[in-house]
Amino acid sequence: MTYTVFGYGSLIFKPPPHVISEVHGFLKGYVRRFAQKSHDHRGTPENPGRVVTLIHKEEWDAFSGSDAFPDEDIVWGKAYTIDPAFEKEVREYLDYREKDGYTLETVDVWGVDLDGEEVIVLHGCYVGRNDNPSFIGSEPLDVLAHKIWESVGPSGPNKEYLYNLVEAVRKLAPESHDSHLYALETRIRALDRLNKLDS
């Protein structure tokens, strides 16, 4: 049985090693939100940044009435199949890379076959569940945008993560619209412009 992992965040623009094939896919019943602290990649323990995680739509609705998920948005990403000869190495790499609150879960990832029918393409991806210590939940968009704009970690500026993710999601599929990502991008680019004016 092949080892396949679904990327909906940084894995879209920074794939794991030893990929032998990839396919675009999407999730049903989930939202992608910047609701996870990043102490080790896009922030520090003293000033954690923010990265995306998956949250079941019903759970998110309970967390945030002020940030309701638009029903037309779908969480699109990429499913990567790993060379079986390197499965152990890649599993260890991903477990380390996603160690800050993420766990590998069984989640149905859907794709579209040659006949245009929806089919399940795999079942696994890393999720920052709402009971993990790094889960922050819902924050007002302006507060969240400023946190992403100002945070920096060993992997670089937090806003770079957002910009890379937005660009990658836009390229995935015509249907891969994400209101949450685009709203944050608008606010953070506005902060960039203000900072240039002030400097």
Image: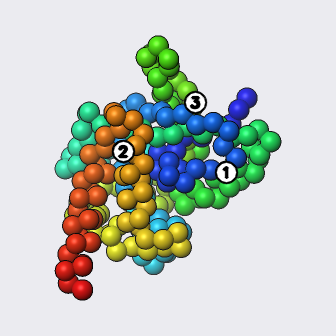
Tell me which amino acid carries mark 2: Arg
Q: CA distance from mark 3 to mark 1?
A: 18 Å
Between circles 2 and 3, the one closer to the viewer is 2
- Dot 3 or dot 1: first in sequence order is 1
Q: Tag 1, which secondary structure?
A: loop
Determine the residue positioned at 53% across, 50% down. 11
Report the quarter where the C terminus lies: bottom left
Between circles 3 and 1, the one closer to the viewer is 1
Determine the residue positioned at 44% across, 74% down. 152
Which residue sits furthest right?
A: 85
Q: CA distance from mark 1 to mark 2?
A: 23 Å
Q: Position of residue 12 (x, y in %)?
A: 50, 48
Task: Please say if the residues under marks 1 and 2 sit with CB atoms less than 8 Å apart.
Answer: no
Let me know if residue 59 appears in the view. Answer: no
Disc number for residue 78: none
Mark 3 = which residue? 122
Q: Tag 2, which secondary structure?
A: helix
Numbered label tally: 3
**What kind of colouring is applied to the model shown?**
rainbow
- Dot 1 or dot 2: first in sequence order is 1
Q: CA distance from mark 2 to mark 3?
A: 22 Å
Mark 1 = which residue? 17
Q: Position of residue 86 (x, y in %)?
A: 77, 46
Mark 2 = which residue? 170
